[in-house]
Amino acid sequence: MKPDTGKLRLAVFGVGLAWAPHRDSLRALAGRVDVAWLVGQGIERVREQAVHFPGARVTASIADVLADAGVQAALVLTPPSTHRGIVAQLAARGIHVLLEKPLALDTPDAQALVDDCERAGVTLGVVLQHRVRPAAQRLKALLDARALGRLTRAAVDIRWWRPQSYYDMPGRGTLARDGGGVLMTQAIHTLDLFLHVAGPVAELAAFATTSAVHRMECEDVVTASGRLQDGALFSLHATTAAYPGFAERIDLSGTLGTACLTGGELVVQWCDGREERCGEQAALGAGADPMAFGHAAHQALLEDFVGAVQGGLAPAASGRSALAVHRLIDALTASSASRSLVALEPLTDSA
């Protein structure tokens, strides 16, 4: 396929809480992306945001976007409960999609959404921006090269904080709108990155609960332990009840050394005494303000998506690759509910 070097004409769905880093990324990439439409139910809010994109049209209806033959791609930032319906219509019209995580409310819907896009031949990217942070990319490269030797153990620690006012907003932390609590809404980023760098999980045992800190339908504390497919043991802790919120951390030890990724900083210590550092530490939205982070990773992910669409390539975080973290969250939830060890079947190209 001959690369398309022109601007990508894009429609944006949703200008709510998750909008700010995307807005700033779109403005920074104005030379590559043309925001043609802003779509949302709160039309006054949509109009307010349209001032950032001269020439963008405003609507509350997806039909207006579908009727515009010039729209090539869409950025979908609406609640998870809306994803399947919106993406199915966009894919049927041949519109490529960059979708805010999670893919959908549950794994069957997520699988169907991915299948819809693949059948239509459109690119589906997912906003799992941790994958494109420099420190994470360096960690991935080290593990792919077996620079740490054979993994011996791993630990994932996500101690975040959300005040009750966060969950008092309609739909927050519910199955109907979000598909779950801390796992689907906050921890999904770090869990996806863990799978991306360390490989698939073979089996696990987990406990999940709603703590005394929050009044909400779904879980805000999860602990688990298990085994990766390569044999290394791992532990997991995820919560939004740890005041005031701490940078998430992935620790990986191997026969040749240990790597610790804390927020955006990687520290590698080899058994021969060498040390390497990459990136810089940041909380990345761990505290009461969930949007307390810069837009650099979002911009990198968006730029990658534009390149994937125009070059006929796979995006850094494809829809199919994102199914793995959905399956992991299912296993954690199922293990807690059944109080049993849960095995995960190896992923295939079709599942």
Image (cartoon, helix red, strand yellow):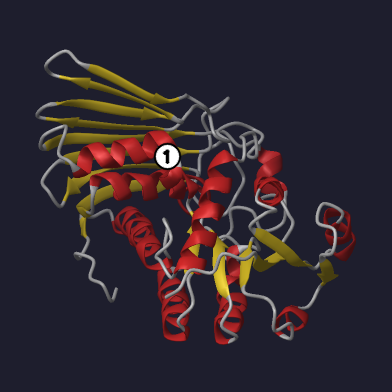
Relative to 170, say whether 59 is above or below.
below
Q: Position of residue 68 (x, y in %)?
A: 74, 82
Residue 139's quadrant in the figure? top left
**Is 152 in front, or is 38?**
38
Q: Position of residue 46 (x, y in %)?
A: 83, 60
Q: Residue furthest top?
A: 273
Q: Position of residue 212 (x, y in %)?
A: 55, 37
Residue at the image position 20 percent from the left and 65 percent from the top: 345
Residue at the image position 10 percent from the left and 37 percent from the top: 150
State left or right for residue 109 relative to residue 276.
right
Residue identifier under label 1: 238
Relative to 250, say whether 171 is above or below.
below
**Is 117 in front, or is 218?**
117
Residue at the image position 63 percent from the left and 57 percent from the top: 32
**Is 236 in front, or is 216?**
236
Residue density around tag 1, few if under 14, some if 14–19, many if 20 or more, within 10 Å: many
Tag 1: residue type? Ala
* Res. 270 in view: yes
In the picture, the quarter occupied by the C terminus is bottom left
Residue at the image position 37 percent from the left and 38 percent from the top: 136
Residue 142's quadrant in the figure? top left
Counting every numbered tag in the picture gives 1
Q: Position of residue 28 (x, y in %)?
A: 67, 46
State left or right for residue 306 relative to residue 21.
left
Q: Secondary structure at mark 1?
A: strand
* Res. 105 in view: no
In the picture, the quarter occupied by the N terminus is bottom left
